[in-house]
C-alpha cells in the first residue's frame, strides 16, 4: 500500500474507490503482495525445496486459497471444515497435512478417505484412534507425531505452543514410546516428525534451538523420518520497528540439520504468507470529543477484527486521503460494539480526521476474517482481492437476512 | 441443574440424553430458570413496575427471545440485526430501545420506520444525524441521551463502561448542551436519560452512586424526563463464592430516587436473565497425560465459548455422570483449536475422567453463543431449550456445507 497523489492505494486501485463501490468495513487483499510473499518464502528455502503447506486457519477464504494453490502451495488444516475448503480450492490431497490436538472420529475418517499426505497426531490416544479407524477401513495410514520440544518461542504467552505446559504435541519420552508403537502397527505408517513452537516468532534462535532438540531426538530414536514438519510461526513486522525474522539464518540452521537427516522439510506458514497482504477499510461514523482524547468511532468492530481485543494486538492505522493537518488531540479508535474491549488503538499526532473519513487497519490478512464473528448481530465484512487494476470480490458482504 | 441418581439433569431431562440425541458441543437452556429469573427480577422491582428490556446482545436466539417476550419483556438492541431479531420474536416496537455508540444512517432510518420506543443517542453527532433523518421523513423521533456518569462499576476493566475514559455516553457538560439542543428541535423529542455503568456488577453501591449523580444532573437540567433508563449490568454468581447483587438494596435506592422524579424506569438486563439458564455440554475427546497435569481435550472450543479467552472468565465445570473417583492429577480443560488461548479452566481434585465422558460448563447462557464464531472453520453448536420433560431444538447445529 502506498499513497498516490495523497490517495492510499493497493496496487493500481484507490482504497477510496473500493469503499465507494463495496461499502465498509471491507477486507482488501493485494495479489502482488501475496505472490511476493510466496516467492520470497520459496527463494529463502530453495536449497532444500520444502513442501509449503499454507495454514488455512489464518485465512479461510476459498478464492484466496485458490490463488495460493496456483502459486504452488499445499495446505495445513486443523479441522474437517478446513480440509473441505482446501480440497474445494483444488489443493491436491498429497499436499495436505492435518494438525490439531482434538481430531474427532468423523474428521479422521474423512481425512483417511481423502488420502491426504499426513495426519499429524498429537497424543497416544489419537494414534490408537487413527489405527482403529484405518484397521476398520483395511488400509495403512501415513501419520506424523507432533513432538513438543519444550522450546520457548519468545513470543506472546497466548500464542506460544512449544513449551511443556502447552497442550500441543507429546514429550520426548512419549515420543519414543509412540515411535516403537508405530513400528509394530500394520495400519499406521510413521512418516513424519512434526513440531510447531508458536506464532509470530521474530527471532531465529528459538528455531535453531528447536532444530537442535529434534536432531538429538531423531538420532536417539534411530528412525528414518521421510518428512520433518517444522510448522510455521514465522512472524511479520506489525509495528513501526520493522523487526523481521531472518529467513536466511533459519535456512542455514535447517541446511546444517539436513546434513544429518535425509528428510523432506514441510513448513506450515500462515501469517507470513497472508498477514501483510490484507487491510481492513473502515469509515469514521462519529467523532466524540472527550476531555483528554477524541473517540474515533469506526464502522468496523471487534467482531470484524478480534486480534486487538483478544491479544492486545496493535495494527498500523492509516488515513485513506492524506492531508497535512495533524490532530492536537489523542485519538482512540473504537468500534460501535457495546463493549469496552471493542477498541483498536490509541494514537497521538494522527492526521486530523472528520466524520465520514476513511481509514485502514494494516496487516490484517491473517487471523482477521478467520477470527471474525457475528457478535451484536453484525454481518460479516466483504472481502476483495486486488490484482493490478482489477478488483475481485472474493466474498460478498453477509446479508442481515442470512443471520436472522 | 442437579444430579438425579448421579445423572446431571436440567429440569426432567438428563444431560446425557441430550448429548446422545443431538451430539456435542450443545448449548442447553432451562426454561424454568429463565422464568424464575424474570419473575425474580420483576418481583424485586415491582414497587415501580419498570419496563424491562432484555439485552439481545447477551443471547440472540430468536426462539429464546420469543419465550422472553411471552414472559413480558421488551428488548434493548444495539444494531439493525438485533432490532430485526427482536421484531421477529414478536416484541412490540413500543417496548424496544436502541443503544450503541455507532448507529449508522441505515440503522437509524430503520429504527425510526419501525417506530420503536426510544433511540438512545450517545453523542452530539448522532443526535444531529437522527434529527436530519427525522426531518427528511417529516416526523418527530423520541430519543434518549446516554450520560456517562463517570462512576466506577468496580467490575472488570474490559466490561466497565461508565467511566470518563470509556467511549460510552456523554459527559455532564455535553449532556446539558444536548438537552438545550433537543428543546429547540422540531424533529427530536427528548424523553429519556440513559446510563449504563458496566457489566457483571455484584455490588449495589456503584448503582447508588450512579443514582446520586443522575439525581443531581436532572435537577440541574430542570428537564422532565419521561423515562430514566438505568441500563443493565446486574451481575450473576459465576464462582463458588456465591456472591450476588443485592436487588433489594438497589430497589431501595431507586425508590428513594423516584421520590424526586416522576419517571418510568427502564432496565436493560441480559446476563441476569439468561446467564445461569445455559450450559455448554461437551465431550472429552482425548486425555493427554503431562508431567504435572492432564490435558482434558474437549470437543467444545474457544469459538463456541469465547469468554475464557477474551476475559479470563472461569465457568463452573461439572461431570455429567457423577462417580466417587477423584483424580490425583490437575486437569486442564482445553479445546481442540490450535491456539494456546483455547483453554477453559484448570481444576484440582476433579472427578476422574475418561475419554468420551461428558462434562458441562455452567452459566454460559449469556455471551456464550452470541460471541461464538467459526474460527478453525468449526460449525456452530446446537441450542436446545428444556421445558420440564420436553427438549426443543431452538437452533440446529450448523452444517459444514453452510460454511464452505
Image: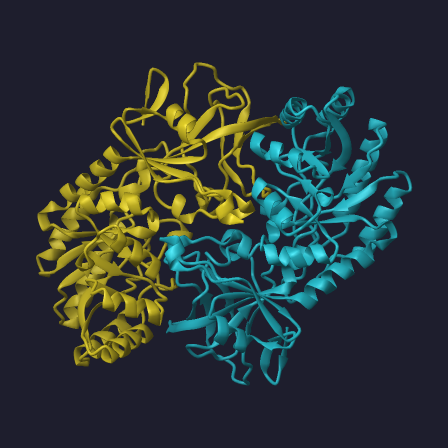
Chain colours: A cyan, B yellow
x then y, percent, for residue B56:
30, 51
Residue at 71%, 46% in the rendered image = A92
The answer to which of A232 and A392 lies nearer the viewer is A392
x then y, percent, for residue A243:
70, 61
In the picture, measured across the screen, residue B266 lies left or right of residue B280, that is left
Location of residue B329 (image quadrant)? top right
Q: Is residue A111 above or below residue B271?
A: above
* Any part of residue B399 in sight: yes
In the picture, measured across the screen, residue A88 lies left or right of residue A49, that is left
Q: Is residue B40 above or below residue B227?
A: above
Q: Is residue A297 above or below residue B230?
A: below
The answer to which of A263 and A220 lies nearer the viewer is A263
Residue at 40%, 44% in the rendered image = B369
Location of residue B181 (image quadrant)? bottom left
In the picture, measured across the screen, residue A31 lies left or right of residue A401, that is right
Q: How many marks?
A: 0
Residue at 42%, 58% in the rendered image = A379
Q: Quadrant of the N terminus of chain A?
A: bottom right
Residue at 72%, 60% in the rendered image = A244
* Any part of residue B202 in sight: no
The answer to which of A343 and B139 lies nearer the viewer is B139
In the picture, measured across the screen, residue A249 lies left or right of residue B215, that is right
x then y, percent, for residue A167:
61, 35
x then y, percent, for residue B365:
34, 40
Q: Is residue B227 above or below residue A178?
A: below
Amino acid at each position: 500500500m502506498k499513497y498516490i497523489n495523497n490517495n492510499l492505494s493497493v496496487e493500481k486501485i484507490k482504497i477510496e474507490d473500493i469503499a465507494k463501490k463495496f461499502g465498509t468495513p471491507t477486507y482488501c487483499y493485494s495479489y502482488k503482495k501475496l505472490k511476493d510473499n510466496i516467492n520470497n518464502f520459496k527463494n529463502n528455502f530453495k536449497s532444500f525445496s520444502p513442501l509449503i503447506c499454507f495454514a488455512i486457519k489464518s485465512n479461510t477464504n476459498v478464492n484466496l486459497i485458490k490463488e495460493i494453490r496456483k502459486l504452488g502451495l499445499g495446505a495445513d488444516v486443523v479441522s474437517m471444515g478446513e480440509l473441505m475448503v482446501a480440497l474445494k480450492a483444488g489443493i491436491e490431497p498429497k499436499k495436505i497435512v492435518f494438525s490439531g490436538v482434538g481430531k474427532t472420529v468423523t474428521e479422521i475418517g474423512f481425512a483417511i478417505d481423502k488420502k491426504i499426505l499426513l495426519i499429524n497426531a498429537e497424543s497416544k490416544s489419537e494414534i490408537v484412534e487413527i489405527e482403529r479407524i484405518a484397521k476398520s477401513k483395511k488400509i495403512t495410514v501415513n501419520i506424523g507425531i507432533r513432538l513438543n520440544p519444550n522450546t520457548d518461542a519468545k513470543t506472546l504467552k497466548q500464542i506460544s505452543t512449544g513449551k511443556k505446559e502447552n497442550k500441543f504435541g507429546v514429550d520426548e519420552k512419549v515420543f519414543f514410546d509412540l515411535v516403537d508403537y508405530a513400528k509394530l502397527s500394520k495400519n499406521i505408517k510413521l512418516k513424519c516428525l512434526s513440531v510447531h513452537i508458536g506464532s509470530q516468532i521474530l527471532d531465529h534462535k528459538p528455531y535453531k534451538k528447536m532444530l537442535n532438540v529434534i536432531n538429538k531426538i531423531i538420532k536417539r530414536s534411530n528412525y528414518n523420518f521421510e518428512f520433518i514438519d517444522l510448522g510455521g510461526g514465522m512472524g511479520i513486522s506489525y509495528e513501526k520497528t520493522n523487526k523481521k525474522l531472518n529467513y536466511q539464518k533459519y535456512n542455514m540452521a535447517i541446511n546444517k540439520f539436513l546434513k544429518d537427516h535425509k528428510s523432506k522439510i514441510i513448513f506450515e506458514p500462515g501469517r507470513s504468507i497472508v498477514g501483510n497482504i490484507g487491510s481492513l477499510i473502515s469509515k469514521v461514523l462519529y467523532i466524540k470529543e472527550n476531555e483528554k482524547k477524541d473517540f474515533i468511532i469506526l464502522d468496523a468492530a471487534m467482531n470484524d477484527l478480534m486480534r486487538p481485543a483478544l491479544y492486545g494486538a496493535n495494527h498500523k492505522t492509516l488515513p485513506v486521503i492524506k492531508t497535512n493537518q495533524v490532530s492536537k488531540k489523542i485519538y482512540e479508535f473504537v468500534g460501535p460494539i457495546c463493549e469496552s474491549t471493542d477498541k483498536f488503538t490509541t494514537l497521538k499526532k494522527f492526521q486530523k480526521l472528520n466524520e465520514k473519513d476513511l481509514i485502514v487497519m494494516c496487516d490484517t490478512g491473517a487471523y482477521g476474517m478467520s477470527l471474525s464473528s457475528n457478535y451484536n448481530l453484525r454481518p460479516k465484512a466483504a472481502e476483495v482481492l486486488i490484482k493490478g487494476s482489477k478488483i475481485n470480490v472474493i466474498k460478498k458482504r453477509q446479508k442481515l437476512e442470512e443471520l436472522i
